[in-house]
Image (cartoon, rainbow, N blue to C red):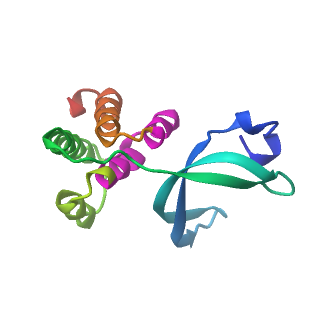
């Protein structure tokens, strides 16, 4: 909910991403398109201030990122599903991103980038954000891409 609608700390998700705004383009309708760079996952632990705006105490969340043969296989499947989905005409990324994803050695980042771009349901993206096991996160991305992509993602 919007800040004005918050009644208690239970009104929002306690896991979030901390990041930087890397680029901002204002649109004619008054909204903006942003390019964000995620830096880390955090959990809100307390609020030192709620008005006029919230100031939170946070703890950094570390991913369980032990890479294995399973991790590599899951990442390969994510890339395969991405390749199927990008051709749907609705969510295509520039060719430069294709090369970037194919060459990406950080499999945690691969899963996060594909989830944030191609998983449509906000609650599912939140579930991916909250998952600290990289393998489980990749499994969730695969599951969600299959379910949301229908036969094109099979």
Most distant residue in the right direction: 52
Name the quadrant of the N terminus. top right
Left or right? Give the position of 39 relative to 91.
right
Magenta segment, prevailing SS (helix, strand or loop): helix
Q: Residue at x 29, y 52 (%)?
A: 110
In-image side of 18 versus 88 (left or right)? right
Instruction: Residue 65 in the image: state x and y as whole percent.
Output: 31, 48
Residue 137, image x and y in percent?
Answer: 35, 38
Residue 123 part of the magenta segment: yes
Q: Quadrant of residue 148?
A: top left
Quarter of the image where one finds residue 98: bottom left
Give percent across and percent down for residue 72: 16, 45
Relative to 33, say whether 47 is above or below. above
Residue at position x 62%, y 39% in the image = 13
Viewer-nearest residue: 117 or 19: 19
In this picture, which residue range is highlighted in magenta? 109-130
Tell me where residue 47 appears, x and y as whole percent.
Answer: 76, 49
Give the vertical position of 128 relative to 40 (above or below): above
């Amino acid at each position: 909910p919007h800040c004005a609608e918050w009644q208690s700390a239970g009104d929002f998700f306690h896991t979030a991403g901390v990041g930087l705004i890397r680029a901002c383009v204002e649109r004619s309708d008054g909204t903006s398109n942003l390019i964000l760079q995620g830096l880390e996952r955090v959990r809100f632990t307390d609020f030192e201030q709620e008005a006029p705006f919230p100031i939170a105490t946070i703890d950094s969340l570390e991913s369980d990122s032990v890479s294995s043969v399973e991790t590599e296989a899951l990442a390969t499947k994510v890339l395969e599903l991405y390749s199927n989905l990008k051709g749907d005409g609705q969510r295509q990324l520039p060719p430069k991103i294709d090369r970037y994803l194919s060459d990406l050695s950080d499999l945690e980042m691969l899963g996060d980038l594909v989830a944030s771009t191609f998983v449509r349901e906000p609650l599912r993206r939140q579930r991916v954000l909250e998952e600290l096991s990289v393998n489980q996160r990749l499994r969730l991305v695969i599951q969600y891409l299959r379910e949301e992509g229908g036969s094109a993602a099979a």
